[in-house]
Image (cartoon, rainbow, N blue to C red):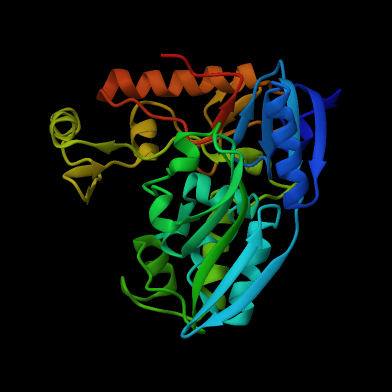
Amino acid sequence: MEMIAPYTTLRLGGPAREFAEATTAEELVSLVAEADRNGVPTLVLGGGSNVVVADEGFDGLVIRVVTRGVSVSRDGEQVVVTAEAGEDWDALVVRAAGEGWSGIECLSGVPGLVGSTPIQNVGAYGQEVSQTIRCVRAYDRLTRHVVDLEARQCGFSYRDSVFKRDPARYVVLAVTYALEVSELSGPVAYAELAARLQTGIGGRVPLAAARETVLELRRGKGMVLDPADPDSRSAGSFFTNPLLPAEQAAELAVRAPGHPRWEMPDDLVKVPAAWLIEQAGYPKGYERGPVRISTKHTLALTNPDGSGTTNDLLALAREVRDGVREKFGVTLVNEPVLVCCSLGE
């Protein structure tokens, strides 16, 4: 049996009962469709950067997506880029920055494959892929047809989409992005990045400068995959920033006067999960056995020397979640997909 751990950035996860690689979209559809007909559970695995797999592994078919191909066309002032799901995401960002395609440069260094970007509505440093996605091609396991979903049909919201909300239905095959033809970045929307670039919010800088500065910031937080950096052996941010309704936000303001917050649409308030975690008593480097909170970034839970288990990681995650809930009344939600395991209540 093939072990799943080597295909994940956390290096965690037990054996797969069956394992296959899909080199084309047609092969991917065929593998999934056949498994569905035979009642075999499937796990579609991309770069393994946003997944936590149980120590017991997966009692079904793991399909690793290794499809390749990028096509480009011009549409007025935009370039339309369609990439197969198995394309490396950061390689696409590198090409975009080099070709003068603006709109995804602040997503530099995000690990994983193209196919995962719409599922999570990947975002960082003020950009989200939903801002540039024009269409997602997917296999609909309910209707058993390949469908092209326009951006408005994808239900994008903060770190969410129809693909994430109904993970058993769609298998992403390719993603089409519409990018601006420009040597300048999109308007800088993140204060830390703006300060480092010495520009104001809304300012634009050369694409190369935006990319290199984002990479510099990410490396400082252990968020660029690097075999020499044990803090990068993670699944990225383990918890999403909570979006609190007005009543809950008011409660938190009583418990933690002056806490950092951002006003969001629909009367929601976003609170930085990292701040909640640190203030609840879990600093950078906090250890629980062989796993720990990153020494560089409070939101990342790491398996620094590879000796930890998924159960170790989940125990740390539960401790952090429960500690934040007890102190602040806010329940943190995991960002990575948990496979055959859970944090419980």
Find residue 253 and report its horizontal and vertical position in percent.
Answer: 15, 34
Q: Where is 123 relative to 273, above or below? A: below
Residue placed most toward the observer, 59 or 271: 59
The image quadrant where one finds the N terminus is top right
Residue placed most toward the observer, 171 or 235: 171
Residue 211, quarter of picture: bottom right
160 sits to left or right of 15: left
The image quadrant where one finds the C terminus is top left
* Picture mark count: 0
Q: Is residue 148 visible?
A: yes
Residue 100, quarter of picture: bottom right
Q: Where is 79 relative to 194, above or below? A: below
Find residue 175 and report its horizontal and vertical position in percent.
Answer: 58, 58
Residue placed most toward the observer, 244 or 63: 63
Find residue 225 and report its horizontal and vertical position in percent.
Answer: 67, 50
Q: Is residue 299 visible?
A: no
10 sits to left or right of 74: right
Which residue is painted at 67% across and 31% down in the image?
43
Residue placed most toward the observer, 273 or 48: 48
Find residue 305 and report its horizontal and vertical position in percent.
Answer: 73, 32
